[in-house]
Amino acid sequence: MMKASGTTVYLLRGYPRGQVIGLLGLMFASAVTEGFGLLLLVPMLAVLTGDGAKPTTSPDWLSSIGGSLTLAQLLVIFVGLVVLRSVINHFRQLGGQRFEMAVVDRLRARAWNALLHCEWRVVSKRRQSGAASLLITDIDRIGFGANQVLRALATAVTLAGIGLAAFALAPLLALAAVAGGVLVLLAYRRMRARATHLGEQLGKAYADVHQQFNEGLGALRVIKSFGREDAAAARGTEAISGMRKVQIAFVRDTGLSQIALQSGGALLLAILVWLAIERWHVDAVAIVPLVALFARALPLLGALQQAWQNWANAAPAIASAMALIEEAEAAREPEPDDACALPVLSDSIELRALGVHYAGRTKPALADIDMTIRARTVVALTGHSGAGKSTLADVLSGLIAPDTGSMAIDGQVLDGKARRAWRGKVAYVQQEPVLFSGTVRENLAWAEPGASDAQMVRALGDASAQFVLALPDGLDTRVGDGGRALSGGERQRVVLARALLREPALLILDEAASALDAENELAIARAIERLRSDLTIVIIGHRGPLAELADTIVTFENGRISGSAG
């Protein structure tokens, strides 16, 4: 885990230097105005009590103010300083809020970008709800922590200003007060360590809540059909209760630390005042402003401790975020460039001694795969669940690279940038159709942003999805959240049209019609029949009309080819 100092430097590093300097300047100005405003109590008291009551311990320039200015003038200066400090604090808080937002936006964008460009085999092993919790909740906690860093820094600067003001009045007393304050803060190191531990627990609790609701929303139909609403509600309530217990524990610890800090600080203040009067014989006129300075410092000391504790609680979130970012960036896919020759697939796809091994598994997902897929043919991959069909689909689509052996397109071995470029010529249609909230047009254009209406209409026709054109709004029909406004078969045909719109060289159908009724399955089979002479098609794990179109059927078992026909 990053140490607090290293994390703070990281958060500040990406923020514009001029704005950081501006924030620090506002903090310094706020401290100066507060300290000087409190020091004005000395000449005010001198004016009110007469020249003879001026404190002998105060500097000459401060004592002379009481003699050169009237009480009215001193009060005007005091009010002016309060107003000035209020304005400075307004802009400091505004700048602090912008800083917090910038930290959140920068980290969230970096984490999301890292996940999007990460190798599939790395990102696919992560739990979706965990990644969502980190992107949404944990990074917000980091922003709050960053704000607490600024708050602690501003408070420390203000305390330093108050300390200097006290030193100007009574150096010995000021040094004793500073030493006492430092000892009080050091005494709370264990409390901050516990705050860090609770922060780690809170991150896990947030992830658990996200998982429960993510799974529940995805299984809502099943939950209702089985009549398990109460059980699902109980699991959600249990997850929330666990999160609240951690939050309450942190609030309780914070409250107890504040009670002890305020009580200890008040005791320290009482002891120092007694020593100042009875032992060090500090002037009576200086005692009042000193008491005012220390009384102002006491809640600030509590605020500094609380900000520090809040930061310790948020620190584990940045450790989690940086772990995800560093892992994803270390596994970043190579970017294709103009110099990379794009495979065409005019002859064949050749797999030679190909193997894929997943970390943590004893058996390979694929082993010793030797096969040739001729261009413009239909190949069906069959076998039991877990036999390796979908892993081979990931290899064929360029999502993952084989650990052993090779894959070549027209004799060109796919590795590095060539594999990334090949993905631009592959269309993948999975069992569960994925549509985004919006219109049919927007969903189609997502795959091919520059596509014209004529191209979209042609793709819909090729996918047996002409029903879209008969809808009242045609291409501008809204599909609803996840495409819920369409039936399952309609969604799948729109997804197929979107895949065809990019004019792929290879079309992969991964259980694409297994959940459809006979009519929709037949409609997709007719679409594939029309396309078979124009592109290469791989059909995974399907029986019925689609499998009947296959020129070759390859059977898999335990990650190996167990048979081939056709």
Image: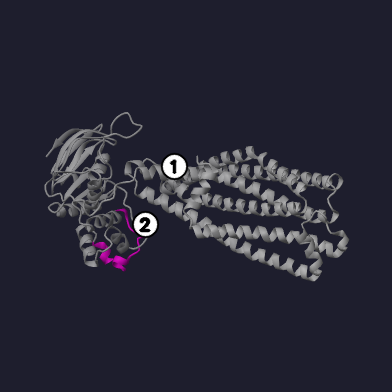
Q: Is residue 25 left or right of residue 62?
A: left
Could you say whether the residue bearing mark 1 is in a helix, strand or loop? helix
Q: Position of residue 381 (x, y in %)?
A: 21, 40
- Please tell me the numbered disc located at residue 484: 2
Q: Which residues are magenta?
A: 466-488
In the image, farthest residue toward the front: 60
Residue 43 shown in magenta: no
Viewer-nearest of discs 2 and 1: 1
Q: Position of residue 315 (x, y in %)?
A: 54, 44
- Mark 1, residues whose alpha carbon is within 10 Å: few (<14), some, or many (≥20)? some
Q: Quadrant of the C terminus?
A: top left
Using the numbered discs, state the Cα–Cα distance from disc 2 to disc 1 in whole angstroms: 36 Å
Could you say whether the residue bearing mark 2 is in a helix, strand or loop? loop
Foreground of the two, 303 or 362? 303
Foreground of the two, 381 or 376? 376
Q: Quadrant of residue 158?
A: bottom right
- Please tell me the numbered disc located at residue 323: 1
